Each structure stands twice: as C-alpha cells, then as structure tokens.
Amino acid sequence: MTIYSTMSSVHYIRYAVAYVFIISGLMKFINEELSHSFISLGLPYPLTLMYIVALLEIICGMAILMNKYIKHATIPLIIIMIGAVLLTKIPILHTGFMAFAFQARLDIIMLVLLTILYSQSTKRL
C-alpha cells in the first residue's frame, strides 16, 4: 500500500487550498502591483485592508496545511473569496456572462473547495 492510496481526496484539496492562500498572502506583501489593485477598488484604508487580508490568508492557509482549526480557518477565507468576487468579478458582468464566467472561474473553484473543507472539517481528515 502506497501513501497515495491511503490519502483521501480531501487531503489533496487541503494541500492545494493551503498552497493557493499562503502564496496569495505572501504575494500581497512583496508585489507592488497588488497594492495598486487594492487601492483601485475604492475601499477605505486599502493598504491596511490588504495587509489584514494577506495575514489572514497566510495564517488560515497554514492552519489548513497543518490540519488544525479547519472549520475556523475556512470561514475568513470564504468571506475573502466572496468579497473578491463581489468587488472584482461582478463588475465584469456588464461585458457579458462568458467574460464573467472566465474571469471568476478560479474564485468559484476556490469557494467550492473551501466549502468542501468546511463541510468535511467535522470528520477526520
């Protein structure tokens, strides 16, 4: 029996989600272009908000990676993803549904994967 046969698909989802959010959070600290994107959203205190989001992504991503507090870690990430869709993807709808669907595809996938992790968190992962 190999390691691959003993690991469930939820483990792979957990690793993928953790990777995406840890890298995303780190990039917010080191990529100036992302700070310009946050400023252009018109939110109050955009840089402070960006750093809070970045810290949440890193901390929650690490918790998911370490299989700790999964249910608690997924909630802020779901809120972040909903906010990202509302602020950056919904405005694209005026150009057409397919443009929106294409631009929102990864955000929607992450929401689905976070929902799976949340629902599976009461079970042993």
Image (cartoon, rainbow, N blue to C red):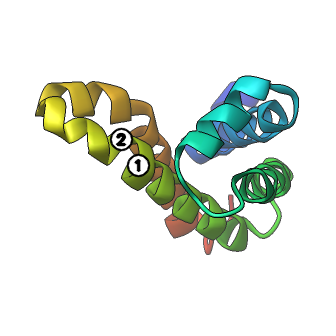
Q: Which mark is residue 85?
A: 1
Decide if residue 8 is in sight here.
no
Q: Residue at coordinates 85% horizontally, 50% vertically from top-left?
A: 62
Secondary structure at numbered mark 1: helix
Image mark for residue 71: none
**Element at label 2:** helix
- Residue extending farthest to the left is 96
| In the image: residue 108, left or right of residue 98 | right
Residue at position x 72%, y 37% in the image: 35
Label 1 near label 2: C-beta < 8 Å?
yes
What amino acid type is highlighted by mark number 2?
Lys
- At 83% across and 64% down in the image, what residue appears? 68
Residue 26, position as x, y percentages in the image:
84, 35
Quarter of the image where the N terminus is located: top right
Residue under numbered circle 2: 89
Instruction: Report which quarter residue 40 is drawn in.
Output: top right
| Residue 3 horizontal side relative to residue 5, left or right | right
Q: Position of residue 121 (x, y in %)?
A: 62, 68
